[in-house]
Image (tube, helix red, strand yellow):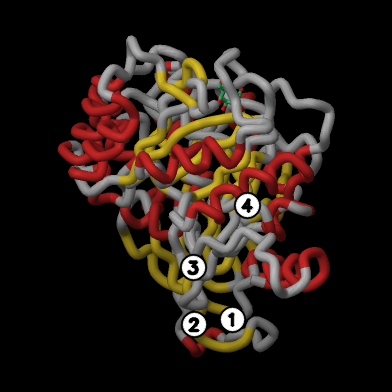
Amino acid sequence: MKAIQVCLFLVCGISVVCALNNGLGLTPQMGWNSWNHFGCGINEQLIKDTANAIVSSGLADAGYKYVNMDDCWAYSRDAQNNIQPDPKGFPSGIKALADYVHSLGLKFGLYSDAGTKTCAGRPASLGYETNDANSYASWGVDYLKYDNCYDDGTPPEKRYPVMRDALNATGRSIFFSMCEWGVDYPPAWAPAVGNSWRTTGDISDNWNSMTANLDKNDEGAAAAGPGGWNDPDMLEVGNGGMNFSEYRAHFSLWCLVKAPLLIGCDVTNLSNDTLYILTNPEVIAINQDPLGIQGRKVSNVSGLEVWAGPLSDGAVAVVLFNRSPERAAISASFQDIGVTKSQANVRDLWAHQDLGVFEHEFIATVDPHDVVMVRITPTGQQQQQQPTESEGIIEEEPVDEVYYGDDN
Ligand code: GLA
């Protein structure tokens, strides 16, 4: 809100709309995107099958709504410079596809690029922003991912607002997902331009890539909030390059840092483990909490990390994150994570279990490359007032209760 007002009054004056003002993204977007699994191998049947699977698998009920095509749908421009889809992959046209997705109660997204070509060499939108925004609106598009390849040397701060304004001018609410890879530090300027902005290069389906993106995305955490989100790139859960613990860690942390939850696997062929991770309602609720404050890394001792962030009901969401190769105990001090009371109720969001009352800190044993994720609800006295023994506080022994075995 503040960013919108500053933009309106300082840059544009009150008569011109120059800020993103589409009312979207009040919580991070949830959906699916074709790129991580399918790359350029997309067509209308795949998108229809995907949309059907999002509904039949229960993903839609869990909150995943956007069905987004990435690069490689665009093919040419007609005599009026209107963008045309690849006739082989999309013989029925984009409007028919959007209509189909809408008929299932889902939303439909497309991809373009603020350059002369998309990253895969297809026609892009630089210089054609109004034509393209009008085409998207006439087709019923709900979401645009806007990439940064083949630019003309103009900084993204100048190129991206042109598409924002073209989308605004259509009168249709279209989620604007900026993808300039963090090159010009978007946390400093993107909240007035997009509903989300990539803060990193492309994620790959491996541990080092996932954790590197997580760390880089933490740098601009303060910029995120209802209406605009830092984006450490799409989910790799279910693509096969990481094990169960690593995908659970990936998903838990994406939820804690209020990242977009865009599934990047083949949802027509989901394993039980993948579905279990992607649909945990207690973990998704952290991501979708209306307060919208991005959780942050609060401590790191040799790869044993604590990440935390406040929630709208006064609780604190916490991820104990073991980046080391050994099973280890990780402690979250109430003071470090912003719990101001001396005692708190702790609930394990993967075990779906209340763990009891803890005082001053929560400690759990965490498997290598895994997490323990909890919701900590303050209770009792303010932190500085030390409780006496007669108050009967129970210090839990957490190791057995929160240990996740290999079979989990
Ligand atoms: C860039 C983006 C990716 C994807 C590809 C498509 O690399 O960062 O997310 O959209 O382009 O070509």
Residue type at the position of mark 2? Thr
Q: Quadrant of residue 59?
A: top left
Q: Earlier in the sequence, mark 2 or mark 4?
A: 4
Residue type at the position of mark 3? Ile
On residue 341, the disc is 1
User: Which residue corresponds to mark 4?
Assistant: 165
User: Which residue corresponds to mark 3?
Assistant: 376
- How packed is label 4: few (under 14 Cα within 10 Å), some, or many (20 or more)? some
Observer-nearest of 402 and 43:
43
Cα distance between the residues tagged 4 and 1: 46 Å
Residue type at the position of mark 4? Asp
Observer-nearest of 299 and 102:
102
User: Which residue corresponds to mark 2?
Assistant: 379
Secondary structure under tag 1 reads strand
- Residue in the image at 67% along x and 31% along y: 126
Q: Is residue 149 above or below residue 389?
A: above
Q: Is residue 378 above or below residue 371?
A: below
Q: What is the x, y in percent for residue 407?
A: 30, 30
Cα distance between the residues tagged 3 and 2: 9 Å
Would residue 36 be visible to someone looking at this image? no
- Quadrant location, the N terminus: bottom right
- Residue in the image at 31% along x and 26% along y: 93
On residue 227, the disc is none
Disc 1 to disc 2: CB gap under 8 Å? yes
- How packed is label 2: few (under 14 Cα within 10 Å), some, or many (20 or more)? some
Disc 2 to disc 4: CB gap under 8 Å? no
Cα distance between the residues tagged 2 and 4: 47 Å
Observer-nearest of 83 and 342:
83
Q: What is the x, y in percent for residue 11?
A: 81, 64
Q: What is the x, y in percent for residue 211?
A: 63, 33
